[in-house]
């Protein structure tokens, strides 16, 4: 009888950490993989998302954010699948959510520098535009030129005129560097 009690206690103790480590919390990064849809749409949705401080994530194509905090990875995956089905975007999506309990996961950022009011990292969220990243850094200073904003990604740089509406919606990616230069004598 003593051996059976020890065995039951051992089995129950083994299941205890599983429930404790699967809850998603605000401010954490989660990996979401979408399958069962065309490959170009898998690439649009699959990626790393940061759970907002309010516990929500915004998924591409969905009209409303989804509550992620407090759910297990499996529960969140089912919620995302149901949302895509209910909005008639996908009929048979399969979602996999990977949630690490590692406390050292870093938040995804872009770096904004030079003539902005708050230089340094800006929190990256899916759909962040070049213009919005500069605004999240407090916008250009009175000396900053929005006409020659440099976006550097993977060692490649391009210059954009953010006073031109067609350049305002350029999407940024995690680890991009954005530089707002000083205005020239002519004001550009």
Image: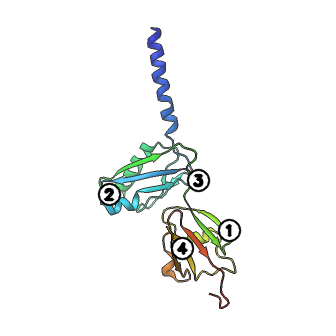
Please, is residue 153 above or below residue 28 in the view? below
Q: Which residue is mark 1?
A: 118
Q: Mark 2 sits on what residue? A: 90
Mark 3 crowd level (few <14, some 14–19, many ≥20, 10 Å Cα)? few
Q: CA distance from mark 2 to mark 4?
A: 34 Å
Helix, strand, or loop for circle 1?
A: loop
Quadrant of the rendering where the C terminus is positioned:
bottom right
For marks 3 and 2 on the same chain, the one whose residue lies earlier in the sequence = 3
**x%, y% of residue 66?**
47, 53
**Secondary structure under the numbered disc 4 in the rendered image:** strand
Q: Residues within 10 Å of mark 4 (few under 14, many from 20)?
A: many
For discs 2 and 4, the disc positioned in front in the rendered view:
4
Evaluate if marks 3 and 2 touch, with contact meaning CB atoms under 8 Å apart. no
x, y percentage for residue 13?
50, 25
Location of mark 4 (residue): 151
Badge 1 crowding class, 10 Å Cα cut-off, few under 14, some 14 to 19, many 20 or more, is: some
Cα–Cα gap, marks 1 and 2: 41 Å
Mark closest to the chain's N terminus, 1 or 2: 2
- Residue 53 has which mark? 3
Q: CA distance from mark 1 to mark 4?
A: 17 Å
Question: Which of the two marks, 1 or 2, is nearer to us in this view?
Answer: 1
13 relative to 22, above or below: above
């Amino acid at each position: 009888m003593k051996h059976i009690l020890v065995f039951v206690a051992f089995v129950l103790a083994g299941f205890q950490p599983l429930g404790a480590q699967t809850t998603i919390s605000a401010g954490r990064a989660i990996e979401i993989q979408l399958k069962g849809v065309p490959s170009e749409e898998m690439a649009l949705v699959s990626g790393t998302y940061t759970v907002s401080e309010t516990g929500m994530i915004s998924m591409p194509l969905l009209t409303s954010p989804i509550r992620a905090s407090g759910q297990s990875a499996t529960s969140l995956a089912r919620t995302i699948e149901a949302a895509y089905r209910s909005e008639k975007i996908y009929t048979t999506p399969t979602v996999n959510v990977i949630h690490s309990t590692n406390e050292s996961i870093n938040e995804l950022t872009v770096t904004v520098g030079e003539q902005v009011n708050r230089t340094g990292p800006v929190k990256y969220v899916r759909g962040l535009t070049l213009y919005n990243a500069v605004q999240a850094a407090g916008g250009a200073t009175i000396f900053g030129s929005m006409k020659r904003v440099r976006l550097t990604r993977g060692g490649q740089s391009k210059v954009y005129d953010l006073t031109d509406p067609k350049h305002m919606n350029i999407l940024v990616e995690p680890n991009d560097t954005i530089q707002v230069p000083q205005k020239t004598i002519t004001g550009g």
